[in-house]
Image: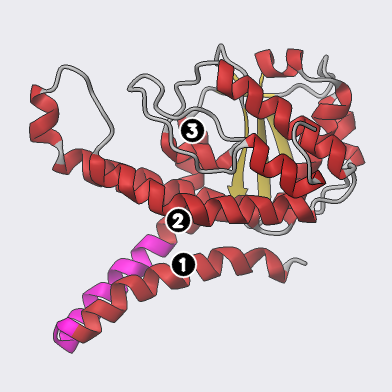
Amino acid sequence: MKKNRFLPSLFLLGLIHLFLLVPTALFLDWQYLIPALALLGAMDLFLFFVYEKQLFSSLPLTPLPPEDPWNLHSLLKKSSPSLPVTLYLIKVPYPISLCFGNFGFCRIVFSEKLLEMLSPEEKEIILSYYVQAGTRGWVFFFTLISALLKGANGFFVILNLPNRLFQKKQTMNIVFRLFLQGLSPFLRKIHLHLDQKIQGPSPKKLARTLWKMQSLYDTESSPLSAPLAPLCFANPLTNSKTGDSIPLQPNKRQRTKALIGAYPP
């Protein structure tokens, strides 16, 4: 299982390498392959050793105390994590949970508002889901996706800077929006696959928890940026300040029907 943790992320990085190296080899002189390889090497080092730390330091997180009032540490032990897992509270006024990390550890994050809305069983299901996703390598995969989305967003913001200076209402760059919409079917299939592989809770209990989480996100305004959306248990509204919402996960109807063949759960 430890070796398998690398496979999703290595597959993603391999696709990125091919996307850059194949056009370079076909349309440019071979001398351009050297700087292309150097650029990819620098990118790999950043993704593996830097981005996760930057993400951790950029979020308003506080470690969850061992004797937490929600009993999360005890619930986490029931999941029997095979890799180091740390729990955090995020200081935001809306219900949210997310998980990110490297190939050797996970950081699981909850907001207090969400914890107040979940039953002990639902908390245990979400923790188990994140732990198993980390064990199978998908947490690191989604962390890499988050880094790539953040980089793409920054790139398109720079390209769109002249237009943004004259726009009263800030909107998502149209090219970045198309990029997210192209990525969306790929990520939705991965989440559906992961839902099917989760062990422990019955499919009906998992479907109900996913349905509840997505219903909360559908009614609560969450100003979460698009690069963080793949890290969440269900898909939050992204860029709600600009009215932009990109479905980087299946909707609650798709996930529920895939798990138990019926909707609502």
Above or below, comparing residue 232 to residue 121 in the picture: below
Amino acid carrying label 1: it is Leu
Q: Tell me the quarter of the picture where residue 10 sits.
A: bottom right
Q: Number of marks in the image?
A: 3
Residue furthest out toward the bottom:
30
Residue plotted at (81% across, 18% down): 68
Q: Tell me the quarter of the picture where residue 26 sits.
A: bottom left
CB atoms at circles 3 and 1 under 8 Å apart? Answer: no
**Residue 187, image x and y in percent?**
54, 52
Residue plotted at (79% across, 31% down): 208
Q: Secondary structure at mark 1?
A: helix
Q: Secondary structure at mark 2?
A: helix
Residue plotted at (88% across, 32% down): 75
Foreground: 123 or 171?
A: 171
For marks 3 and 1 on the same chain, the one whose residue lies earlier in the sequence: 1
**Residue 59, image x and y in percent?**
50, 28
> Which of the image's four quarters has the C terminus?
top right
Front disc: 3 or 2: 2
Query: Would residue 193 be counted in the magenta stretch?
Result: no
Q: Which residue position holds label 2? A: 47
Q: Specify whether 120 is left or right of 83.
A: right
Foreground: 263 or 148?
A: 263
For marks 3 and 2 on the same chain, the one whose residue lies earlier in the sequence: 2
> Which of the image's four quarters has the N terminus?
bottom right
**Residue 18, image x and y in percent?**
37, 76
